[in-house]
Amino acid sequence: MREEWHHAARTNPQKLKGEHRAILPTACAALHAVALIMLRFYFGVMGSSKSAMLLMQRYNYRVQGYSCALIKPAIDTRKGVDIVHSRIGLEGHADIVLAPDHSVREQLLWLETRKPNPLEHVFIDEAQFLTESQVVELADMSDKLEIHCYGLKTDFLGNFFPGSSALLRFADSFTELEQSLCWCGAKATMNTRVDRKGRVVKEGEQVLIDTGRKEEVITYIGLCYKHWKLGKSGLNGNT
Ligand SMILES: [Zn+2]
């Protein structure tokens, strides 16, 4: 059975569903890697298409018949409490809106009772807002579920978020999304908070969500390290 399963994993991942998937917890480490059951962290700065990539990947898995869950942290309510929104217009409804004191495992167990099939893939948007204990829960579940976390690596001051710090320590796989460019054309690596006049902000709380209200406009953009350090946003002549 193990040889057959090993072959199936290399040649047709879909064969891992059903009876093959049931033996995953007892598979050896080498087979674990082949089975692609992992905790994955996809990270990038603002404008690197993280949410769009997540929604497209989830769509592709759902088309293939996989049972998927979509999670977003409760902290991000810009487009509605359960909406995962991308800047290019793609949107999805989250199955779970995760509060900091929620157990991810309990939430997924609850969701699974409402699904016709056991969950196979979990997608998490804005994963930088996860707590460390939630990331540890995900790592503990990643021998049975494929977990895809999308989020920022660092905040506007260049410090880790709790969720990104934990993911960089506990995830199995890391992918940097490099689509975002600084106004100078260089790769954007630094998240930058700018005020309504386009000035770079270098102080304040780590989490300050853009509410969209005109009187308190806060925007986040990606800059290269040089222009982030110099505080040159490229907006309103700030170059
Ligand atoms: Zn630059």
Image: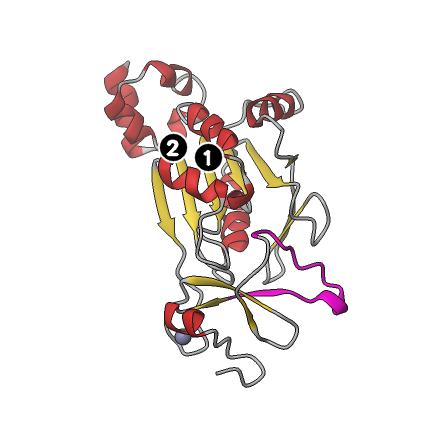
Q: Is ligand 1 less than 8 Å from the beta carbon at label 2?
A: no
Picture coordinates of residue 205 (x, y %)?
59, 53
**Lower sequence index among marks 2 and 1:** 2
Residue 147 tag number: 1
Label 1 sits on what residue type? Ile
Quarter location, residue 142: top left
- Quarter for ligand 1? bottom left
Picture coordinates of residue 60 (x, y %)?
50, 45
- Residue at (23, 19) in percent of width and height: 3
Q: Which residues are magenta?
A: 206-221
Q: Relative to 179, say whether 163 is above or below.
A: above
Q: Relative to 121, say whether 227 is above or below.
A: below
> Is 214 colored magenta in this rendering?
yes
Q: Relative to 208, say whether 130 is above or below.
A: above
Quarter location, residue 24: top left
Seen from the viewer's position, the closer of residues 70 and 140 is: 140
- Predominant secondary structure, magenta span: loop
Q: Residues within 10 Å of mark 1 (few under 14, many from 20)?
A: many
**Gap in angstroms between the C-alphas marked 2 and 1:** 6 Å
Seen from the viewer's position, the closer of residues 15 and 183 is: 183
Seen from the viewer's position, the closer of residues 178 and 188 is: 188
- Residue at (76, 64) in percent of width and height: 213
Label 2 sits on what residue type? Met
Label 1 SS = strand
Could you tell whether 96 is left or right of 223 in the image? right
- Pointers 2 and 1 in contact (C-beta within 8 Å): yes
Q: Residues within 10 Å of mark 2 (few under 14, many from 20)?
A: many
Label 2 SS = loop
Residue at which label 2 appears: 38
